[in-house]
Amino acid sequence: MGNTVGSSSALHELITNSECAYILGLWCADGHHRTSSIGLTNVDKRLADRFASYLETQLPKERLKWQVYYPPGQRPQGLKVPMQPLYKAKQIVYRPYVNSRPLLRLFQTAEQQIVRLPKKYILAYFAGRYDGDGSVDKNLRSDLRIAYSNRPEAETDQKLLQRLSCYQTRVYHYRRAATYVLYVSRYNATQFLHDIAPYSTIVQSLLPRRDLVALEEAAG
């Protein structure tokens, strides 16, 4: 994998299918990186496993590494990876990663170019964003939100959704929390969840079984 810094094709090099778009969205939400490593930090092992599986498609499996942190006295069982207690942890934290400066550069450059994401991959990307930093009321309509650490990122994603012409959205700034939130209108929330469900681990666990069956029938 070559040096992709500044390359206008980084986004298209990285996003070759819907799963890659999902992974980019998930990384933008919950990814971590250092000088030469790229990975994911999440309390949901399903998401960590999915990200790890992606990394194994990009590099030899032996390159994949894990770190697991847990509250004292709650050491996970059955995991053969490095683990250590963390007194500040309230839940088990999973962190799969690889040391790969070229892959890190590719992700970072693709993130900067996300506004040019092909339309066919926008929903998969938002499925990753939602799984990482999204939430909705238990009625699956109210308070559907995705959180961001800065306004430009939130507004860029808002522009992506506007390209689909299906959802009413707004960006709100919570000053005390230093957080920006992209809200999807409650009038469009159910449709949004159904639209990202084929790609989303979290939404598939929220929707009633009958809805999942209908989605599977529509897809196949």
Image (cartoon, helix red, strand yellow):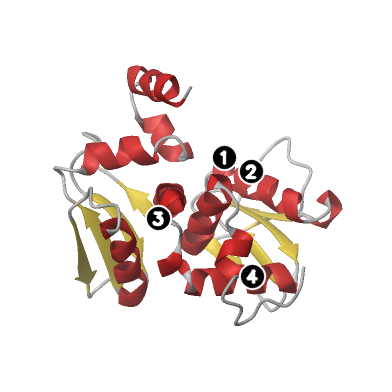
> Which numbered disc, 2 or 4, marks the residue that appears first in the sequence?
2
Q: Position of residue 166 (x, y in %)?
A: 23, 48
Q: Tag on residue 49?
A: 2
Q: Position of residue 39 (x, y in %)?
A: 64, 61
Instruction: Evaluate if marks 1 and 2 touch, with contact meaning CB atoms under 8 Å apart.
Output: yes
**Closer to us: 147 or 157:** 157
What secondary structure is found at the residue carrying circle 3? helix
Write the residue at 43% across / 39% down.
202
- The three-letter code of the residue at mark 1 reads Arg
> Which numbered disc, 3 or 2, marks the residue that appears first in the sequence?
2
Write the residue at 75% across / 68% down.
100
What secondary structure is found at the residue carrying circle 1? helix
- Comparing labels 2 and 4, the label whose residue is closer to the camera: 4
> Which numbered disc, 4 or 3, marks the residue that appears first in the sequence?
4
Instruction: Evaluate if marks 2 and 4 touch, with contact meaning CB atoms under 8 Å apart.
Output: no
Tag 1 residue:
46
> Which numbered disc, 3 or 1, marks the residue that appears first in the sequence?
1
Q: Badge 1, how many Cα within 10 Å: few under 14, some, many 20+? A: few
Q: Tag on residue 133?
A: 3
Q: Tell me if residue 31 comes above or below residue 66 in the rendering.
A: below
Relative to residue 161, is residue 91 drawn left or right? right
